[in-house]
């Protein structure tokens, strides 16, 4: 892992060879890419239509193939961290902002790639860890390290 957690995680999602390689989740049928998910979690842009948004299913695009009873909410990191219920959990578990970022990534479509990195299957998800030529495997080592740290902290509260 990169000792500069935020920098390492950001590079894993935005600068590696698979950063814009599309993948589709098996649970909600959401197609996205790592760089877009990083943006969605850390600094969502106004006016951008992110996959599996808005929360209100009745507002999803027509002929939408997404699954689920609701979508997800694009919330700026700063705004999320100011929410009373989030602040309380942050303080209780002593989570860092980087851990919050990684947990939010993990609870979205990126879980597909993190699990593929750890498990080595399914094949289509492992392929999404690589560039278009099947090389330059992205193991998301800093992100997974940060997720493990956060889950360990949360398990103690």
Image (spheres, helix red, strand yellow):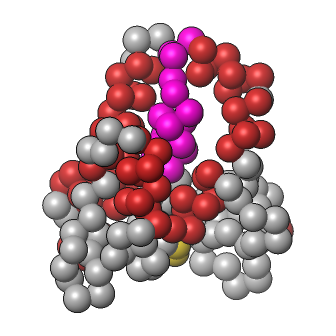
Range covered by the magenta-colored residues: 92-107
Where residue 97 appears, x then y in whole percent? 56, 33
Q: Establish if 66 lies above or below 110.
A: below
Q: Establish if 84 lies above or below 68.
A: above
Q: What residue occupies the far bottom of the structure in this picture?
A: 133
Where residue 145 appears, x then y in whole percent? 30, 39
Residue 29 visible? The answer is: no
**Residue drawn where x is 76% and y is 30% of the image:** 82
The answer to if 100 sits in the magenta stretch is: yes
**Residue drawn where x is 68% and y is 44% of the image:** 77
Q: Nearer the viewer, residue 29 or 82?
A: 82
Apparent side of residue 62 relative to residue 103 in the rendered image (left or right) = right
Apparent side of residue 9 relative to residue 71 in the rendered image (left or right) = left
**Residue drawn where x is 19% and y is 54% of the image:** 119
The answer to if 106 sits in the magenta stretch is: yes
Apparent side of residue 64 relative to residue 106 in the rendered image (left or right) = right
**Residue drawn where x is 65% and y is 65% of the image:** 52
Q: Nearer the viewer, residue 67 or 151?
A: 151
Image quadrant in which the N terminus is located = top left
Q: Considering the whole magenta stretch, tell me its main secondary structure.
A: helix
């Amino acid at each position: 892992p990169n000792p500069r957690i935020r920098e390492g995680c950001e590079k894993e999602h935005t600068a590696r060879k698979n950063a814009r390689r599309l993948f589709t989740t098996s649970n909600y049928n959401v197609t996205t890419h790592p760089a877009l998910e990083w943006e969605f979690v850390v600094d969502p842009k106004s006016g951008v239509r992110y996959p599996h948004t808005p929360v209100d299913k009745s507002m999803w695009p027509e002929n939408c193939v997404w699954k689920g009873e609701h979508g997800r909410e694009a919330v700026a990191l700063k705004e999320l961290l100011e929410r009373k219920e989030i602040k309380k959990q942050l303080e209780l578990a002593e989570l860092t902002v980087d851990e919050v970022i990684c947990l939010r990534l993990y609870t979205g479509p990126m879980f597909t790639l993190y699990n593929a990195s750890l498990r080595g299957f399914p094949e289509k998800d492992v392929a999404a860890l690589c560039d278009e030529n099947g090389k330059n495997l992205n193991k998301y080592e800093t992100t997974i390290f940060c997720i493990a740290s956060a889950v360990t902290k949360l398990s103690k509260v």
